Amino acid sequence: MPAGVNDVRHFLLPDLGEGLTEAEIVSWHVAAGDEVALNQALVEVETEKAVVELPSPFAGTVVEVLAGAGETVAVGSPLIAIDTTGTDGATETDGATEKVPMLVGYGPSDAPPSRRRNRRAHRDRGPAEPAHGGSRPLAAPPVRFMARQRGVDLADVTGHGPGGLITRDDLAAHLAGAVSVIRSSPSALGRESRAPVRGVQKHMAEAMVRSIATAPQACVFLTIDVTPTVQLVERLRQNRHFEGLHVTVLAVVTRAMVLALRDHPALNSSWDDATSEVVTKHYVNLGVAVAGPLGLVVPTIKDAQDMALRELTGALADLTDRARAARCTPADLSGGTITVTNVGVFGVDAGVPILNPGEAAILAVGTVRRRPWEFGGEVALRDVVVLSLAFDHRLVDGRAASLFLGSVGEILADPTNLIALG
């Protein structure tokens, strides 16, 4: 290349999967003039399903950031311009369109030196100085989401984290102060507040409307004595083979669902509107509804039919932890075939869940409570739970739904069936 001629390339917002058409810029990790390495994290974006970091498809020097934090950008639009002159071809491109080689966290584990320098720069900033001269204070995506949900401008919040980072505690303290102001002066913040609906919350709302509009939904209930399962969970927590794992009743429920689907495959099917066909899945991608900082998300345990109870316990804990930390990828949040939701974690006895679009059933698990219950011909205090199964009546009739729910309940009432059924 002739001297003085720069090779400036544009990184376009990629299709992050599942037909996503746009994403909101959450925060930039780089600014004009920064040196970036191949696969270095450039920007954090929020799609309809998750918050993800996008890595650089090439090395070079940042010329210009083309989309600011808070902007919604369409897939295929330019995000950043990078001068790759003198980088010895350290790029990953496909013709004229740059592509993302991998999502951060799924490639090499060591951050490149330039990224470490950028992190040091964050630490060196004063508490009131925004990242890279941007207009927004420093805060993680979950904190930003919580602030949006509550109508809080983060510019009004004092951050006490590294480099002035606003933490959840900072936001909570700010909200507590706002509550005291409201109590002393109800008109201080007005009678209403508004926050835009976007990202995961918008996707969830649209999915629920679509589900109700397209699938005739019904629900059956079963109240069951799960004392033996509760006792099993306590024993497994002391078992060396489950060391380091947090065994829960929900983990046993997920295994019971997988086993019950063997005899009731209609609950693991979907309706194909394009061909008017019923598609029965011979694998189980078990969705787990989680209330995370970005709203309700349903990450999936892929191929749960191949997992024993120990493996399911670990997969369930890993998935829920990442969902609550807003670190699920679009791949985590797609491909489900049946879902379980633990409404009992909120102290609720039962509920009527709404189907995930494209699935035949969703099981809601209520709180396990000690109740007077008939046992051995007498009344005794037992651990009792209510199971609620919502189903698509096009795919599953009341008999099939009841038999499936009964099979799940039978395993929970006598968990030795976990061994008998494999």
Image (cartoon, rainbow, N blue to C red):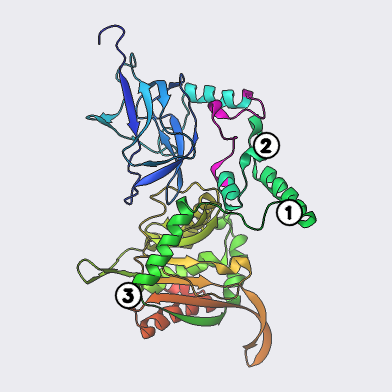
Circle 2 residue: 159
Task: Choose mark 2 or mark 3, whichever is in front.
Answer: 2
Q: What residue is at 60 percent from the left and 75 percent from the top?
A: 349
Extreme right residue here? Answer: 184
* Label 1: few (<14), some (14–19) or many (≥20) C-alpha neighbours in 10 Å: some
Vertical position of residue 38 compared to residue 404: above or below: above
Indicate whether residue 374 is drawn in magenta: no
Circle 1 residue: 179
Q: Is there any visible trace of residue 410 in the rendered image?
A: yes
Query: Residue 216, located in which quarter of the rendered image?
Result: bottom left
**What is the span of residues highlighted in magenta in the rendered image?**
124-142
Inspect the image, locate mark 1, and give the three-letter code of the amino acid beneath it: Val
Horizontally, residue 257 falls left or right of residue 292, namely: left
What secondary structure is the magenta-colored segment mainly? loop
x, y percentage for residue 256?
46, 71
Q: What residue is at 77 percent from the left and 54 percent from the top?
A: 185
Horizontally, residue 101 falls left or right of residue 329, namely: left
Query: Residue 335, located in which quarter of the rendered image?
Result: bottom left
x, y percentage for residue 301?
42, 57
What separation in Å lies between label 2 and label 3 (alpha carbons)? 52 Å
Front position in the image: 402 or 15: 15
First in sequence: mark 2 vs mark 3: 2
For the residues bearing labels 1 and 2, Cβ distance under 8 angstroms = no
For the residues bearing labels 3 and 1, Cβ distance under 8 angstroms = no
Q: What residue is at 52 percent from the left and 59 percent from the top?
A: 290
What separation in Å lies between label 3 and label 1 (alpha carbons)? 50 Å
x, y percentage for residue 170?
69, 43
Circle 3 residue: 266
First in sequence: mark 1 vs mark 2: 2
Front position in the image: 393 or 192: 192
Indicate whether residue 132 is drawn in magenta: yes
Inspect the image, locate mark 3, and give the three-letter code of the amino acid beneath it: Ala
